[in-house]
Every structure is written in C-alpha cells, then in structure tokens.
Image (spheres, rainbow, N blue to C red):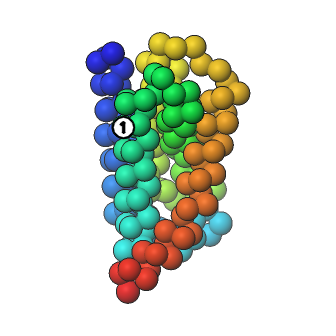
Amino acid sequence: MMYYIEAEIIFLICFTLHNIEEAVWLPEWSKYAGRFHPQTGKNEFKFAVTVVTLSGYLITYAFWKWGSSNEIIRYLYLGFVMMMCFNAVFPHLTAAVVLKKYAPGLLTGIFLNLPVGLYVVFFSNPEHLELHKLILGFAVYSGATLLSLRPLFKIGRKFFS
C-alpha cells in the first residue's frame, strides 16, 4: 500500500507546484487571455487557487482513509486527478497554441500533472477501473470545481478589498 500512497504524494506535490505557478503568473496573464480565463486580480485568484488546492488535499486524504471501502470517494478522487490531467491540455496547452503566448501552468501541467496523474489513475490503483464511473467522477469533480470558481473569485475580492 505504501507504494501507491507515494505516487499520490508525488501527484499532490505536482498539483501544488502547478497551482503555485498559476498563482504567481496567471493573474497578469488573464488580462490577455480572452475566452480562456476571466480577468482576475492577484488576491482573488490566490484565494480561489488556495481553496481548490485544499480541496485536492481533502479528497486525497478521504481517498487514503476510505477509498478502498467507498467507491464514491475512490472515483471522486480519480476524477480529481483526471481533471488535473485534462487541465494540462485544456485550457493550458490550447490557450498557449491559440494565443501564441505561454499560459501559466502549461509546463507543470504537461510535464508533471499529466504523466504523474495518468500513472496514479491507470497504474498505481490495483483495483479494476470502471470507465463509466471514472468519467462520472471526473464530470462531478470538474463540474463542482468549475462552478465554484466565480463564487470563490467573488469571495476573494470581497475578503481582500
């Protein structure tokens, strides 16, 4: 079991580095991002990315604690990891190609989150994966995260103004 937890810890480190990269450079980049990201201030973005990062840590902890006995938690965790793999391609890679400008989070997304995340989902989990449950976990976790962003930006703006 420790071998698998190590892969999940490495993924959390990659995820955290990715979010730090975004926190540092994305607010300035968002001024030119157009449809790829709403313009956002530094403090509101840092607040939102901190909450999203904490949610990743919480679902990982829940997975370690109950994932082997709770299929919902297991697939929500795997959905979280898949969300971060997908995030490397859209919006980061897509935005960089379309805008012809580096999108903050691209390198950490493509070279850290994507390969480590795919390893966690498809190779470090000894149990058989059910694709429809993985897709559902991805859709639920991604939907919840996307729906939370605007309110988190709003809270961050109010909290830090």
The location of residue 101, given as percent across then percent down, is: 52, 59
Q: Position of residue 39 (x, y in %)?
A: 53, 74
Image height of 78 relative to 130, above or below: below
Image location of residue 23, percent across then percent down: 37, 62
Residue that lies at the very extreme toward the bottom in this rendered image: 161
Q: Which residue is drawn at 46% across and 31% down?
A: 117
Helix, strand or loop at mark 1: helix
Is residue 155 something that shows in the picture? yes
Q: Is residue 160 left or right of residue 83?
A: left
Residue 146 or residue 67, whichever sits in front: 67
User: Which residue sits at x=41%, y=37%?
Assistant: 62
Identified by mark 1, the residue type is Tyr
If the image is split into quadrants, where does the N terminus sit?
A: top left
> Is 16 left or right of 45, judged from the image as shown?
left
Residue placed most toward the observer, 158 or 82: 158
Front residue of 96/117: it is 117
Q: Which residue is disc 1 drawn over?
A: 61
Relative to 137, 45 lies left or right: left
Query: Would residue 89 be seen by someone viewing this image from the given angle?
Result: no
Residue at position x 70%, y 27% in the image:
132
Residue 20: x percent and y percent? 33, 55
Quadrant in which the C terminus appears: bottom left
In terms of image quadrants, where is residue 138? top right
Q: Quadrant of residue 43?
A: bottom left
